[in-house]
Amino acid sequence: MYKIVRKEILAPNIFSMDILAPRVAASAKPGQFLIVIADEKGERLPLTICDYDKEEGTVQIVVQAMGSSTRKLFEMEAGDYLKDFVGPLGIPSKFVNEDIEELKKRRMLFVAGGVGTAPVYPQVKWLHDRGVEVDVIMGAKNKELVILEDKLKAVAGNLYVCTDDGSYGFHGMVTHYIEELVENQGKEYDECIAIGPMIMMKFVALTTKKLNIPTIVSLNPIMVDGTGMCGACRVSVGGETKFACVHGPEFDGHLVDFDEALKRQAQYKEEEVKKLEAFECKVEEARE
């Protein structure tokens, strides 16, 4: 059992939890993920690590309550216990094993979309703590859904916020701001790391390919089981079959078959809708 020591609402239906898990915190690295199970009847939830504190022994997750399992997690509070909290899993970000002095010479751009801001943060923080400054573009539908802005601002060289409706920061998609930085402001980048919704990563990859910027994407949104056994996260990368949870979650964005991945991501949509409806009925009955 793993104790929830802190919970914070970050935006409508988006929340963070700090979980007491010393062994996970001691081993966690940027880019890795966890398997979380809320209770005895809970599903396996692959969630990317947002932050970790080796001294406190805590690991932070950020979750958007969309389906029945994430809604069940949302109902839990500080002091409650999770049944399972397994990790860290997956291959860490490749820069973790690279020479720091070489990294300092590299011009890196991170692009975070929605809840994808959470896994971007530990990567940028890790680099900042080692003297590597990077630029970050953060996108959300509107101002209300912008999360972790202060935390990212503290570790990014430059932070640019975009909103689809123009209610905060730059009015437009993150792809538009990539073009703004490169084509209008004369910025040059050696690498882009994009994390967010699958459709966002697809269009970021298309944009950076046009601009000749090598790009890494994280395919955590299509993971289900988290062990490679279910096959739900099977994806084609450069014509080869990979499993996001075992071989990733990070891959060369210019080689990923996003159309195939998007179809695979939608395969359980009908079942998820039915489970969410059943869960909401149970919640309403319990409140009555």
Image (cartoon, rainbow, N blue to C red):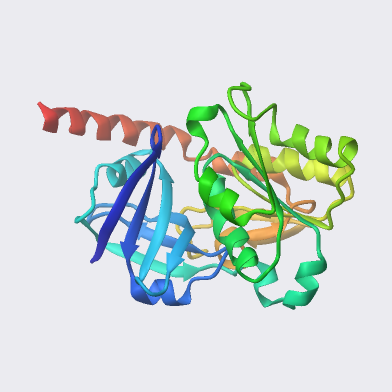
Q: Quadrant of the N terminus?
A: bottom left
Q: Is residue 109 depicted above or below 166 in this figure?
A: below
Please indicate, yes or no, whether residue 184 appears anywhere in the rendered image. Answer: yes
Q: Is residue 253 depicted above or below 245 in this figure?
A: above
Q: Is residue 30 depicted above or below 215 in this figure?
A: below
Question: Which of the 4 image quarters holds residue 249?
Answer: bottom right
Residue farthest toward the left in the current orientation of the protein: 288
Q: For this rendering, which residue is in front, 154 or 175? A: 154
x then y, percent, for residue 58: 36, 66
Q: For this rendering, which residue is in front, 151 or 204? A: 151
x then y, percent, for residue 204: 74, 42
Please indicate, yes or no, whether residue 221 appears anywhere in the rendered image. Answer: no
Q: How many marks?
A: 0
Q: Quadrant of the C terminus?
A: top left
14 vs 95, left or right, is left
Going 77% across and 76% down the picture, which residue do you hit?
A: 101
Going 86% across and 39% down the picture, which residue do you hit?
A: 185
Question: Which of the 4 image quarters holds residue 92?
Answer: bottom right
x then y, percent, for residue 181: 82, 40
216 vs 185, left or right, is left
Q: For this rendering, which residue is in front, 34 or 28? A: 28
x then y, percent, for residue 89: 49, 68
Going 56% across and 42% down the picture, which residue do you hit?
A: 265
Going 78% across and 40% down the picture, which residue do you hit?
A: 178
